[in-house]
Image: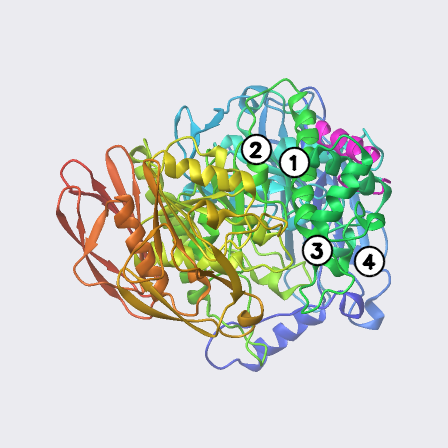
Amino acid sequence: MGDYAGGRWVLANFKGIIGKDTIRILVERSACGAMELTARCSFASYQEGEVPSFTIQLRRPKGVMENWRNGVLESWSDGECSVEILNEKGKSIEKRSVPLQGKGELLVGYLTSKRNSFAPGFYQVQVKQNIRFPYLEQAEILSYTTGFWVYDKKLMESGKQFTTNESYLLREGKPYPVTGTSYMGSDVHRKFLFEPNVFVWENDFAEMKSEGINMVRTGIWTAWKNYMLDVGAPTEGVLRAVDAFLLTAKKYDIPVIFTFFAFLPEMWGGENPYLDQRSINAQKEFIAGFTHRYRNVNDIIWDFINEPSFCNPQQLWMTRPSGDKYEVEAWNKWLKEKYQTTTDEELTAKLQEVYRCTADEAITLPSLDDFADMNIFNERRPVKVVDYRLFAQEMFNNWVREMTKAIRSNGNPHQLITVGQDEGGTYERPSPHFFADVTDFTCLHNWWYNDDLLWDSIITKSPGKPNLVEETGVMFYEKMDGSAWRTEQEVANLLERKLAFSLGANGAGFIEWVWNTNPYMKSVNEAAIGAHRADGTAKPELEPIIKYAKFFAENKHLMTGRVDEDVVMVIPHSQMFSTRNFATEATQKCVRAMCCHCRVPMRAVSEYKTESLKSPRKLFIVPSPRTLNEQAWKSLLNFAENGATVLISGVIDADDHWVPVERAKQLGFSVSSQPIMQEEFLNIDRNEIQLSFRGNKSQRLEKAVVDQGGLSRNIGTSGVHLIPRGKGNIIWSPLPVELSEQIQATVILYSLALKQANVAQIFSLEDDAPGVLILPTIFSNAVMYTLVSETDRDTIIKLKHLETKTNIDVTVPAQRTSIVFVNRNDGKIISTF
């Protein structure tokens, strides 16, 4: 490129001595410079009766030696270029010669087929050109192969539709654990719809099918105006390329997830990507241009947007207001609907109370400064932030509803829809727990939190909807000297662990990112990710992908009748959405204590979505919420009254806007709130445990101090309280146990709650192995044990499956995984990974 365009590297890849004659030949070949022969079909797909045409180009950018720069390329080409068309069976059906014309650095030829008709199917086009270099005795043959489809309506409409249950995508009513990959083109990557080479796709899909890949995610990540310059007029060449891509996938029965936008949707001249109707209408036209074309394709899945943010384009990857007129209008309307006051004056007065502000600033959007945690907030209004993040969730859902109209207008209700969110959805950005209401399944792209992969999966799984790990891979990390932090094998081991969680932690499967690395990206990180290197060779990380794909293809029949977990973590979203967020840490500690130490599986529900739980559970844990929505509090009391045990820790006397409420009093206590000390003591079931709260926590966290003479009875001498409530119980710790430095107190407290809730263990261990996670998934006739090593040594796990009292020995390699399917009737091992 640039000054180096046309340069040619000739590498002698062998051991030994190179003779002078060989060196001369290599130098001469290098001195001839680089040349490229390409062929492009006018369309990647043709309708029956259309005649294919082709453009052939021979390039030699900037001749290396000065006296070769002008008028030599045409003299080097040996006669006319050979073009041959082969049908799907590899039989030659047309062979022609094409003269290449031009002078200097570029020769071009054009060809239109002489055949009157082509049967539906795939065709490849082979192009060859002899080149005679001045210093070389033998001609060099340049070749290029491309391809095209003639539209096959029967094949395009042959797919089997998808449905879902709470855990999996279903095909023909049966679980379809996804073992897929992201794919664009291994030659031009993200430009694949502008520069399609169907022959390349054909080879790649054939390989993917042979390796067990059962789904591909593709789509459009950038340059949306190039796909639809004028609203309502998608580029026909692009649509023909999508035709060819889908037909190639159909040929190998690999369903496709197609993504429309990334990060923020294109605005097409509007001012707000989510709220300006001009932008929304253009986006719907864009989506409809694709979805109406494939109205009869049942097994295509539409992914509206990749890793969305809301709403300020200048604050990508965060949830921050832009302040434009559309957002101001939507914000004001949302406040009126949320607070249900009869007059504007009443609304202003209510917001003054909630936001602790003056009347003239009550309804305004939060400022960017309001999102920063400060020791002294001064003129900031941080309590507004919770409302803005809830507003953002709802506005994003409204946008999804609008885009859904564009899809459903094609008349096909069977095409599933989703949103592909990354780990920003575990915090403030559009969250699976909220957009689950408007999608058929949710997604997680787990990139960064490699120490909390189990938490990633649990906290993004919404009740009632499958959760697909739609993009998973390993980000490139560097040492200080710029070299790779992990070897390729270490990357493969980490990816294997991620794949294990995608199915072992109540997930619907995985879509690996990405089949071929993207060498065209300037980002070292992007260019380093992929199952295949730029030269097409496979990386070690391809091995676990293949093994998992084939293992679950063989055992998916066992994955029916999944049994719900007895334990549910209630995500303190009001605390998580606040400026002062400790809920992320609290939920991470909760998952690790329950799943890794107590060895009991769990799932999660948002405090704002407790009504989405359709079946009763034995134990609910609310980890150190500090603030809690009033409706969530009422739900927790109702759960207890109907027989569940509810465990909650820390101060509970504030709603989601920090407005005081007397919840401890409802439980029979008179309490006050005080700053936490660096060292605290808590009695749990007659065990006095020391808890440390270090760093800035003594200036951010509080504890509840209980007055003497409370109406409950203590468990042990003091500390944790058990409060009977209806048919169940509430267990309350006045200290925010999950936020202590040590996990011991949390484990002891959870063990007590499990016993009180009568949650039965699924398995026991002869010797505990804290460096190995063991995740049981119970189905109608089998239990799947997923074992994930977090340690540096191979571990032999001696496990007893308690339902059948069967002993099972499993070896888990260091940093790797093992999976065992056990028959629930007799305890025999059915299958192992």
Magenta residues, as a range?
269-290
Residue type, mark 1 in image: Asn
What residue lies at 57% left-to-right and 45% top-to-bottom? 183
Apparent side of residue 474 relative to residue 494 in the rendered image (left or right): right
Depth check, front residue: 678 or 136: 678
Rendered image: mark on residue 36: 3
The tag earlier along the polypeptide, 2 or 1, is 1
Residue type, mark 3 in image: Glu
Secondary structure under tag 3 reads strand
Main SS class of the magenta portion in the image: helix
Report how far apart the C-alphas of labels 4 and 3 lie in the structure: 11 Å
Category of crowding for the residue at label 1, using alpha-carbon neighbours closer than 10 angstroms: few (below 14), some (14–19), many (at least 20): many
Rendered image: mark on residue 105: 4
The tag earlier along the polypeptide, 3 or 1, is 3
What residue lies at 59% left-to-right and 38% top-to-bottom? 435
The tag earlier along the polypeptide, 2 or 3, is 3
Q: Is residue 686 visible?
A: yes
Report how far apart the C-alphas of labels 4 and 2 lie in the structure: 57 Å
Residue type, mark 4 in image: Glu
Frontmost of labels 4 and 2 is 2
Query: Label 2 belongs to which residue?
Result: 437
- Whether 325 is among the magenta residues is no
Residue 636 placed where, x, y %? 44, 40
Query: Label 1 belongs to which residue?
Result: 397
Apparent side of residue 572 relative to residue 94 in the rendered image (left or right): left
Tell me whether the residue at label 2 lies in contact with that at label 1, contact meaning CB atoms closer than 8 angstroms. Answer: yes
Depth check, front residue: 20 or 439: 439
The tag earlier along the polypeptide, 4 or 2, is 4
